[in-house]
Image: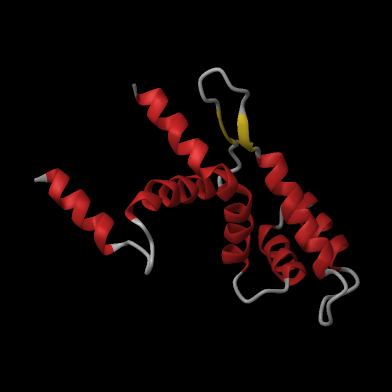
Amino acid sequence: MGALRAAQFEYDNRLPGEHPDDVPERLWVDDGIAELMARRDVVFQRRMRPKQGVTYERFAQAVDEFVMGQLGLNGISNSVLGRLVLAARSKVTGDAKAAADEIMSVANPEAALEEIARQLLTPFAKEGVLAQAEEAQ
């Protein structure tokens, strides 16, 4: 009965136009997004191949690149980076979050971070799923 329920869940949550073979890759990417958002690396190694994946450091670098591109936009204070550093150093999380949200300058900062992670992880999805299968054997 559990297999039937799992198959129904997979079918119900399939994206329009998505091929059933793409589901494991989408799930791998979704799991990887959660790992990166939790400050953990998403790396794997297939048999007889070097390690690959996305480290938290690489994710942070991609977020930095995104934020630096946002700095020149209208409506972002000239002091936002300074306020972010000062709030983080003072451990004032509310102010740090507000400054981070301001500097990202998007309607949903969490979704923007997840999309950055998705773009980094997607090229590794097929290999990541294969590595999981190899590890399960």
Please report the residue visible at 62 percent of the width from the left and 32 percent of the height from the top. 52
* Extreme residue in the top direction: 48
The answer to whether residue 45 is above or below residue 77 is above
Q: Judge by depth and name the residue closer to the eye, 68 or 46.
A: 46
Residue 57, picture quadrant: top right
Please report the residue visible at 24 percent of the width from the left and 56 percent of the height from the top. 9
| Residue 7 falls left or right of residue 41 | left
Q: Judge by depth and name the residue closer to the eye, 35 or 43.
A: 43
Q: How many circles with numbers are drawn on the protein?
A: 0
Residue 20: give x, y in percent of width and height: 32, 54
Please report the residue visible at 78 percent of the width from the left and 62 percent of the height from the top. 67
The answer to whether residue 2 is above or below residue 48 is below
Residue 28: give x, y in percent of width and height: 45, 45
Q: Judge by depth and name the residue closer to the eye, 18 or 59.
A: 18
| Residue 78 falls left or right of residue 132 | right
Q: Describe the colour scheme in one phrase.
A: secondary structure
Quadrant that contains the C terminus: top left
Residue 36: give x, y in percent of width and height: 58, 45
Please report the residue visible at 80 percent of the width from the left and 60 percent of the height from the top. 84
Residue 18: give x, y in percent of width and height: 38, 62
* Extreme residue in the right direction: 78
Residue 129, picture quadrant: top left
* Extreme residue in the left direction: 1
